[in-house]
Image (cartoon, rainbow, N blue to C red):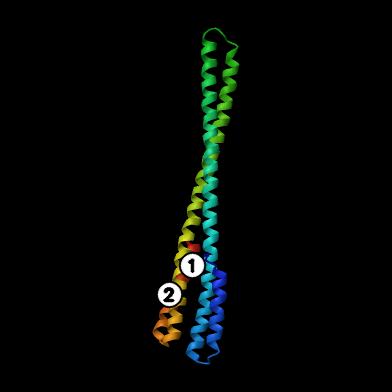
């Protein structure tokens, strides 16, 4: 079964609306808390999914950049071997190979620059992937605390005990703090 934060938020809001019709001020306050927490849980859950996807995308792009760097370094090595062969030929009386050696040196320079650029891109993508993965973890914690707050609010309605409601609001506040931390770090 798939976890759909938006659907869960809608269901919690409907339950809160039904409870509010009981005309009990405590039940109404707890119901409003549930509705607010449900919206926050849906937002955190949705953003958690987005950040996880971005982490995977950046990681895949880093792998592609590494492959490009590897290809460029292979090209560099091939050009190096050709250059050395031309140098040996030129040293053994075939002077016309000196121009080919110089040409290969230029090709090596281009291949090295291409490899260095690909490695820089790889490193940047790895940093971005880690940033998105970090956000994903903070948002997972936020969504979890907020959802526990929703469950605790339900217990508060069933037992009509304010301590459970206050605990739910505390968990919701902690979830909001984690939510904010995801984007402030």
Q: Which of 107 and 8 is in front in this view?
A: 8
The part of the image, by quadrant, that contains residue 173 is: bottom left
16 to 141, vertically: above or below:
below
Residue shown at 51% from the left, 26% from the top? 77
User: Residue 116 location, x and y as percent?
Assistant: 53, 37
Residue 62, given in percent of the width and then of the height, sits at 52, 45
In this view, the mark in front (2 or 1): 2
The alpha-carbon separation of the residues under discs 2 and 1 comes to 12 Å
Under circle 1, the secondary element is: helix
Residue 66 vs 131, above or below: the answer is above
Farthest residue, direction bottom: 23
Q: Where is residue 122 in the image (x, y as percent from the top left)?
A: 52, 44
Residue drawn at (54%, 87%), measured in percent from left and top?
A: 20
How many marks the image carries: the answer is: 2
Helix, strand or loop status at disc 2: helix
Residue bearing mark 2: 171
Mark sitting on residue 148: none
Residue furthest top in the image: 93
Q: Earlier in the sequence, mark 2 or mark 1?
A: 2
Judging depth in this view, the residue of 128 and 144 nearest the camera is 144
Identify which residue is drawn at 53% across, 28% down.
Answer: 76
Label 2, residues with CA under 10 Å away: few <14, some 14-19, many ≥20? many
Q: Which residue is drawn at 51% across and 13% down?
A: 88
Residue tagged 1: 179
Q: Quadrant of residue 46?
A: bottom right
| Position of residue 53 measured from the top left corner of the image (x, y, whole percent) | 54, 56
Between 82 and 15, the residue placed more toward the observer is 15
User: What is the residue that sits farthest to the left in this orientation?
Assistant: 163
Vertical comparison of 151 with 60: above or below: below
Q: Residues within 10 Å of mark 1 (few under 14, many from 20)?
A: many
Q: Do the residues labelled 2 and 1 touch (CB within 8 Å)?
A: no
């Amino acid at each position: 079964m798939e976890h759909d934060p938006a659907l869960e938020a809608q269901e919690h809001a409907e339950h809160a609306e039904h409870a509010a019709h009981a005309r009990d001020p405590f039940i109404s306050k707890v119901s409003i808390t549930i509705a607010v927490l449900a919206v926050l849980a849906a937002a955190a859950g949705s953003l958690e999914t987005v950040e996880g996807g971005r982490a995977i995308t950046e990681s895949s792009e880093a792998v592609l950049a590494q492959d490009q760097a590897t290809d460029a370094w292979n090209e560099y090595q091939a050009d190096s071997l050709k250059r050395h062969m031309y140098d040996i030929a030129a040293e053994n009386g075939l002077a016309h190979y000196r121009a080919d050696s110089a040409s290969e040196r230029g090709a090596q320079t281009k291949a090295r620059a291409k490899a260095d650029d690909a490695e820089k891109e790889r490193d940047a993508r790895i940093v971005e992937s880690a940033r998105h993965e970090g956000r994903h973890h903070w948002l997972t914690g936020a969504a979890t605390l907020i959802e526990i707050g929703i469950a605790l609010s339900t217990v508060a309605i069933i037992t009509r005990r304010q301590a459970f409601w206050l605990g739910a609001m505390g968990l919701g506040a902690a979830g909001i703090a984690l939510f904010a931390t995801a984007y402030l770090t």
